[in-house]
Image: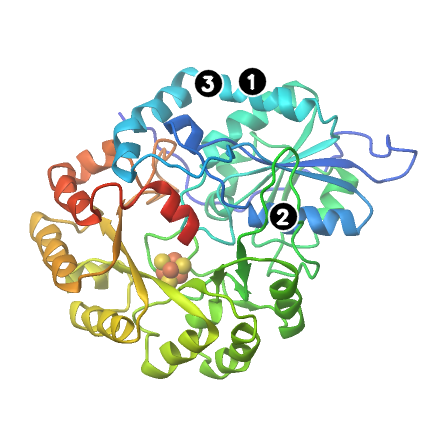
Amino acid sequence: MPRTYPGNQACKSVGAPAKIPGRRGGNDMARVVLLQPPYLRALGSHNDRYPLELAYYAAHLRNEGHEALLVNADFTGSAAYIEWQRLFRNYRYLVDAMRFGSPLVDETVERVVGLDPDVVVVSAGDSLVPWVDSGNAYWSAMFSGALRKAGLFTVGVGPFFDQVPERFREDFDAILLGLPSAKISEVVRSRAAGCTSTGGFDVTVAPLRNLVDSHQAPDTLITSAGCPHSCTFCLGRDTGLSLLPRAVIERDLSETRSTLVEIGDAIAPSLQRLSDLQPMFSSSGRHFSCEITVRQASPRRLDALRQAGVRVAKMGIESGDDEFLRAAGKKQSRSTILEAVRRLKDRGFHVVAYVLLGGPSSTPAVVAHTYDLCVELGADEYVVNVWSHHDLANRDFRYDAHFSSTLAEEWGVSEYLPRFFNLQGSQKMGLGRIIRYG
Ligand code: SF4
């Protein structure tokens, strides 16, 4: 029987300092490790994408005088990745690791404790790119538990906590809710337990550009944080839209070699701001990939993105069934998807289409409509996801993943997956391409 949980509740802060601050030279400064736990490594792959949310927190903490060390424990440095469909086959290893434990936990705790921190900020996914399946709150809670046993103060961050903060209240000493915020300084300084709502994105320093023990460099540049849209299947829905100041974007563009650009402005209502930003991207002489929604794929907007240097467009087409799209809160239809992709292809964009199978209103007919649409679209690549992380308030979602073979079974879409994988072509859609394109 699935376990049930109380609904989404505000996390009650108990506000009691759990540890006396000031062991670093008698002041309030702390040594902080910001940890992206291994996650895809539990499935036989890895995630070399830069942990952006943690990098902003780390930079802010350093700016405030703390020591901040950024660790991506999912990093291996390999340029090769297993095929996307292999993740579905390996999914059972993640389930086993959740149930019975994993040496990855000990390995990571060893590594973190060896850095001698006072505080460990543990991410579960990334609030700045919440659509990338790079973690899970239950999984991160396992690492937090082991670190607390080692006497460390832990802080949880990531998109899951906004939705069900109370669920994880006992798993971390503190939890930060919302987008990266300067409020982390106060939590680290005071070690006050409980939840802190951060509000909008307000970190003004550039994300930290170096990690411990790896040569990773920031690969994603953002022009905004959050998303104003309300797709029911997405952890990033209804998170508002915080536009970064133009000078900040200019600084980040010149200081990093990032080519993944979350030009949030590409999906924001204002075409004017996108036009304002376009020259600085054009003059960089670089090529980028970015998200674009069907609804915002107007000729003028696509022309502006093209001139900005965007060559790869990532688009959540999700489904070929209008009723399914409506129920999912996706403001697009089969015909508008076809038109948007045609416009992209006419302008020479490389189109990466995100497909969503399963979900509360999925039926065999919905899947068939989606497959037919994919064939008709002729996109360059298809990312095949299973609807996951739904109804978080009432379900145990610890085993949810976009590549969950169990959810595929539950939604009745398993038998159709091979046909969709064939659209990807042999070796075409390894996880690396997702990491590279976002
Ligand atoms: S447009 Fe929809 S799927 Fe994309 S980030 Fe926003 S809420 Fe999520």
Please give left or right for residue 403 compared with residue 104 in the image.
left
From the viewer's side, name the closer residue of 332 and 67: 67
Q: How many marks?
A: 3
Q: Looking at the image, is 366 positioned above or below residue 14?
A: below
- Residue lying at the far right in this picture: please name it: 26
Q: Is residue 241 above or below residue 352?
A: below
* Residue ID for mark 2: 55
Location of residue 229 with respect to 45 vertically, above or below = below
Question: Residue 239's spot in the image, x, y percent?
Answer: 48, 60
Q: Secondary structure at mark 1?
A: helix
Helix, strand or loop at label 2? It is: helix
Amino acid on which the number 1 mark rests in the picture:
Asp
For residue 21, which quarter of the picture?
A: top right
Residue 253 location in percent, x, y? 60, 65
The residues tagged by marks 1 and 2 sit, at their Cα atoms, a distance apart of 24 Å
Label for residue 102? 3
According to the picture, the residue beneath numbered tag 1 turns out to be: 106
- Quadrant (top left, top right, bottom left, bottom right) of the N terminus: top left
Residue reaching furthest to the front: 285
Please rate how many residues cluster around mark 2, counting C-alpha atoms within 10 Å: few if below 14, some from 14 to 19, many from 20: many
Residue 246, percent from left and from top: 62, 74
User: For the residue marked with disc 3, what is the amino acid?
Assistant: Ser
Q: Left or right: 412 with respect to 437?
A: left
Give, as a three-letter code, the residue at label 2.
Ala
